[in-house]
């Protein structure tokens, strides 16, 4: 089958309507919007453009299904999640191709994301049957203390475009395990992966109304009525800090329970005793995963002065060798950015750093032709005032600055409003633990360039948000504790 034929074949199985109450249906008024291939700027599919009335219909369905879903046996909820895991693994190639077409990343990275997403369903299939309460004697001896964990109720999820399957899986799997129903609004740039995931969960036996999907290009207008409706009990959002702040303000009106996974500005610290080969490989992974469009991407490289030049040389050579192209090509390692505004923002930050005196070692320009491609870029001696040291780059750009002392490195790493993840390379165990404790971030990659793991709690501090996804902690976001005071002589 020709590549173009295969692309058309996988797109033909993608639902393009809204999923509400177990039924696929058109948006109110029949409106649609185009989903674009960022590598070619061509339209892939037209999907339903939900209106506020559709969002409320989805919440009606979620609210109506909540009681029966909460009463569903934990083992059955777990089995649905397990079957979803198996289906995702079995369909990896097709799902990865859909993701690459709408988001742009290489097929290898898309396959990796499907595997990562599937693991959340497996992990939380096991956690569904491990929701515990307690029973104890009152400290006075008169009576008993009984606690139980119960689902928080209908949840609203707003998911981003950069990991269109994994970010949904990271929220949906624990919510389903806990017994919560869901209304999810995927990003307008990449709705196809979420629509296909919903279809897979349907086929795995998820009852109608438990998961409802509303696609729209009017996110603010469609989400707002959900947050003001008393039936909504929980909001989970992954995206920019700016949008997160706006959603928190809306949620505050109803004291709505919220989880926020927001922006990042990850420092990557390399001390002079580090294994330099390992540090360069880790830097490449931390920087170039997902074309740099990740909240966990290394945003700034703080390298000890004695090795800064050699680190820059080696990283430049590794990035120069990366193959740029459409993600569907088997040799592609770096795909396009998601859209024109995102590419313009990356170019703006690079131009700002160069105007302030940063030395350009590689790239520094948008690539000619169709698609939103930007060349892998390395900048050295980036001055403190450069915007990219305080703003999230979200692209294939590596700014390098040097430091002289451990104190200076820690201070520079913490000089940001964000605190999602930091990376640290050293062979000194005492230094590793000392610096890891002082770094202001929710996660630290110690001598490795990736921290994401379904069995570990993912989340940040400061303006990178609050709440945790994954690990034993992940299901807690969807449970509330009820205390029963028992009179017993």
Image (cartoon, rainbow, N blue to C red):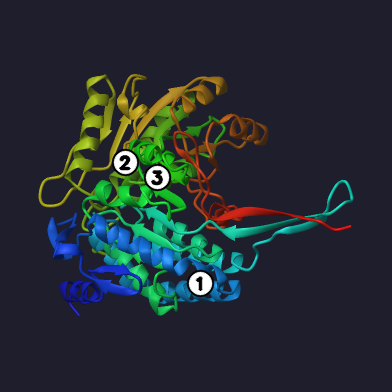
* CB atoms of marks 2 and 3 within 8 Å: no
Residue at the (17%, 76%) spot, across then down: 5
Residue 304 in sight from this viewpoint? no
Quarter the C terminus occupies: bottom right
In this view, the mark in front (2 or 1):
1
What residue would you read off at disc 1?
A: 68
Q: Which of marks 2 and 1 is nearer the N terminus?
A: 1
Q: In this view, does 181 lie above or below 356?
A: below
Where on the picture, by quarter, is residue 247?
top left
Q: Residue 405: x, y in percent? A: 54, 20
Where on the picture, by quarter, is residue 381?
top left
CA distance separating discs 3 and 1: 48 Å
Q: In this view, does 75 lie to the left or right of 113?
A: right
Residue 394 bears which disc, if any?
2
Q: In this view, does 64 lie above or below 278?
A: below
Quarter the N terminus occupies: bottom left
């Amino acid at each position: 089958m020709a590549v173009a034929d295969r692309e058309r074949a996988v797109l033909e199985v993608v639902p393009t309507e809204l999923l509400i109450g177990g039924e696929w249906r058109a948006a109110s008024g029949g409106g649609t919007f185009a989903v674009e291939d960022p590598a070619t700027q061509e339209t892939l599919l037209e999907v339903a453009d939900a209106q506020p009335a559709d969002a409320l219909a989805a919440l009606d369905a979620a609210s109506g299904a909540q009681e029966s879903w909460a009463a569903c046996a934990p083992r059955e909820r777990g089995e649905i999640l397990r079957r979803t895991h198996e289906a995702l693994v079995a369909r990896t190639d097709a799902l990865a191709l859909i993701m690459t077409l709408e988001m742009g990343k290489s097929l290898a990275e898309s396959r990796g994301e499907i595997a990562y997403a599937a693991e959340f369903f497996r992990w939380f299939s096991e956690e569904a049957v491990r929701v515990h309460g307690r029973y104890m004697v009152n400290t006075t001896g008169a009576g008993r203390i009984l606690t139980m964990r119960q689902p928080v109720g209908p949840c609203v999820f707003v998911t981003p475009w950069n990991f269109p399957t994994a970010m949904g899986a990271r929220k949906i799997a624990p919510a389903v395990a806990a017994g919560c129903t869901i209304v999810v609004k995927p990003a307008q740039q990449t709705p196809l992966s979420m629509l296909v995931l919903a279809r897979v969960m349907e086929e795995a036996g998820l009852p109608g109304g438990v998961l409802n999907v509303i696609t729209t290009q009017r996110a603010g207008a469609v989400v707002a009525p959900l947050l003001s409706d008393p039936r909504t009990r929980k909001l989970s959002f992954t995206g920019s800090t700016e949008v997160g702040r706006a959603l928190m303000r809306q949620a505050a009106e109803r004291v709505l329970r919220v989880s926020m996974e927001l922006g990042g500005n990850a420092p990557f610290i390399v001390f002079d005793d580090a294994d330099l080969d390992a540090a360069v490989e880790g830097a490449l992974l931390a920087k170039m995963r997902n074309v740099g469009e990740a909240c966990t991407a290394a945003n700034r490289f703080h390298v000890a002065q004695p090795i800064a030049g050699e680190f820059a040389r080696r990283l430049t050579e590794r990035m120069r060798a990366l193959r740029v192209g459409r993600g569907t090509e088997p040799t592609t390692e770096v795909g396009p950015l998601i859209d024109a505004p995102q590419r313009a923002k990356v170019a703006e930050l690079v131009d700002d750093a160069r105007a302030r005196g940063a030395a350009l070692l590689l790239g520094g320009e948008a690539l000619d032709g169709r698609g939103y491609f930007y060349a892998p870029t390395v900048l050295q001696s980036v001055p403190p005032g450069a915007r990219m040291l305080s703003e999230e780059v979200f692209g294939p750009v590596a700014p390098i600055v040097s430091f002289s002392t451990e104190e200076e490195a820690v201070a520079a790493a913490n000089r940001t409003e964000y605190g999602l993840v930091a990376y640290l390379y050293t062979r000194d165990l005492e230094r590793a633990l000392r610096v890891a404790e002082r770094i202001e971030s929710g996660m630290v990659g110690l001598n490795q360039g990736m921290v994401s793991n379904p069995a570990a709690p993912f989340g940040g501090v400061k303006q990178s948000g609050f709440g945790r996804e994954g690990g034993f902690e992940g299901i807690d976001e969807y449970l509330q504790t009820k205390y029963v005071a028992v009179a017993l002589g």
